[in-house]
Image (spheres, helix red, strand yellow):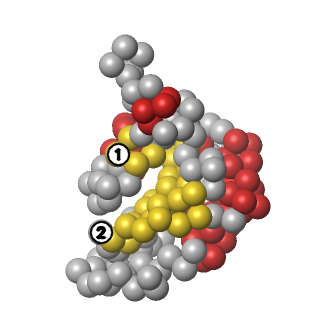
Amino acid sequence: MLTILALTALLAQAAPESSSAPSPAASGMDGYTPHRLPMRNPTLAFGPNDAVIVNSGSTNFSGYTLVIHPDFSAEVAVNGVARQTAVLEADAKSLFAKLDGAMPLDSLAIGHCMKSASFGTTTTIAYHGKVTPDLSCGVDAAGRELARAAAVITSKLNIVPALRHSPSRYPQ
């Protein structure tokens, strides 16, 4: 929950309008202002047009953070180990279309579900300054579609949560 609140606060911050704001050329992408993820994966950068999928992990397994950029490039971090990757164009376009259609994300009708205090996880997606409720408890169609799209992408990228305090388990 703390991760969700910190990510929401970070995403809600608008890019500075002063002359000290980075220029598009300096940031590498037109209109892209990089931000840093809080706490767990401080090395990943994201901007307002990126989709940020965060799985909280549990007592024994680390979560993951996946940042998908509009150009279909991505970064994923599991258990403190980050890597660059790319998402299939069709999968990324589908996710972004579902995110746009579900806006505002923070008002999705998501239900409550029973979870183990030790082994339960939460999965959220941040996009354009809004964060979904926990998608693993989705009860409406939009929430289920977002959860499915995120699961398809993480599966195709072979994102496997690692045991906490152990080396990452995905292939190099």
Please state if 98 lies on the left or on the right of 137 as rendered. right
Please state if 13 lies on the left or on the right of 151 as rendered. left
The residue shown at (63%, 68%) is 153
- The 10 Å Cα crowd at callout 1, few under 14, some 14 to 19, many 20 or more, is some
Which element carries disc 1, helix, strand or loop?
strand
Quick one: which residue is furthest to the top in this view?
18
The residue shown at (57%, 32%) is 30
Q: Position of residue 3 (x, y in %)?
A: 34, 53
The label number, if any, that marks residue 36 in the structure image: 1
Q: Where the N terminus falls, by quadrant?
A: bottom left
Q: Position of residue 31 (x, y in %)?
A: 54, 30
Q: Where the C terminus falls, by quadrant?
A: bottom left
The residue shown at (29%, 84%) is 167
The label number, if any, that marks residue 11 in the structure image: none
Which element carries disc 2, helix, strand or loop?
loop
Disc 1 residue type (three-letter): Arg
Query: Residue 147: which quarter of the image?
Result: bottom right
Please state if 115 lies on the left or on the right of 150 as rendered. left
**Closest to the observer, 65 or 59:** 65
Q: Is residue 57 visible?
A: no
The residue shown at (23%, 80%) is 165
Sequence-earlier tag: 1 or 2: 1
Please state if 68 lies on the left or on the right of 46 as rendered. right
Q: Position of residue 103 (x, y in %)?
A: 66, 39
Quick one: which residue is furthest to the left in this view?
165
Query: Mark 2 highlights which residue?
Result: 80
**Closest to the observer, 64 or 58:** 64
